[in-house]
């Protein structure tokens, strides 16, 4: 059983940065890959990107160059650094490992 708890969401203006955190209940070095997803209002949940236990990352095209995923094994936490936020980045952001999901954190980008 793995528990994931996201935090760091909020209401921000376009162009600013925000960092989300995903705290895991188990040592994350044991997790081979952790992913971030987001769900915009009225839409399906979509992949944002992920990070392997070796630190390799991948991102969907819409966030490449703006978002960065990292992990701190000492804190059992995975981060999603989001820069140059756009209105279309609005949604609930979820952390995922295997079939385990966090409760999500809301990010709203609005002027």
Image: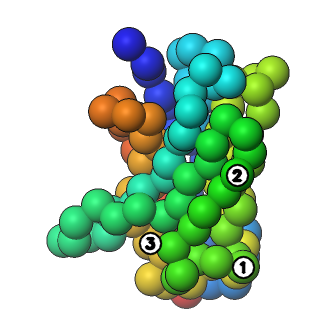
Residue 13, numbered label:
none
Residue 62, given in percent of the width and then of the height, sits at 52, 82
Residue beneath label 1, please? Answer: 65
Q: Can residue 46 be seen in this view?
A: yes
Mark 2–mark 3 Cα distance, whole angstroms, equals 25 Å
Mark 1–mark 2 Cα distance, whole angstroms, equals 15 Å
Tell me the quarter of the picture where residue 93 sits. bottom left
Residue 79, given in percent of the width and then of the height, sits at 68, 46
Tell me the quarter of the picture where residue 12 sits. bottom right
Mark 3 or mark 1: name the one nearer the start of the chain: 1
Q: Is residue 63 above or below residue 106?
A: below
Mark 3–mark 1 Cα distance, whole angstroms, equals 17 Å
Depth check, mark 3 against mark 1: the one in front is 1
**Looking at this view, is 81 or 50 the one in front?**
50
Tell me the quarter of the picture where residue 29 sits. top right
Which element carries disc 2, helix, strand or loop?
loop
Q: Which residue occupies 57% across, 14% down?
A: 26
Which element carries disc 3, helix, strand or loop?
loop
Quarter occupied by the C terminus: bottom right
Residue beneath label 2, please? Answer: 56
Residue beneath label 3, please? Answer: 90
Mark 2 or mark 3: name the one nearer the start of the chain: 2
User: In the figure, is residue 98 to the left or right of 48?
Assistant: left
Which element carries disc 1, helix, strand or loop?
loop
Q: Residues within 10 Å of mark 3 (few under 14, many from 20)?
A: many
Residue placed furthest toward the left: 42
Mark 1 or mark 2: name the one nearer the start of the chain: 2
- Colouring scheme, one of rainbow, by chain, secondary structure, one colour: rainbow
User: In the figure, is residue 108 to the left or right of 75?
Assistant: left
């Amino acid at each position: 059983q793995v528990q994931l708890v996201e935090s760091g969401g909020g209401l921000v203006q376009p162009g600013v940065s925000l960092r989300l955190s995903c705290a895991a209940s188990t040592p994350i070095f044991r997790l081979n890959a952790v992913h971030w997803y987001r769900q915009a209002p009225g839409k399906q949940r979509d992949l944002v990107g992920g990070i392997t236990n070796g630190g390799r990352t991948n991102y969907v095209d819409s966030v490449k160059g703006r978002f960065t995923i990292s992990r701190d094994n000492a804190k059992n936490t995975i981060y999603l650094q989001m820069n140059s936020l756009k209105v279309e980045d609005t949604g609930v952001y979820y952390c995922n490992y295997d079939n385990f999901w966090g409760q999500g954190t809301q990010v709203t980008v609005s002027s």
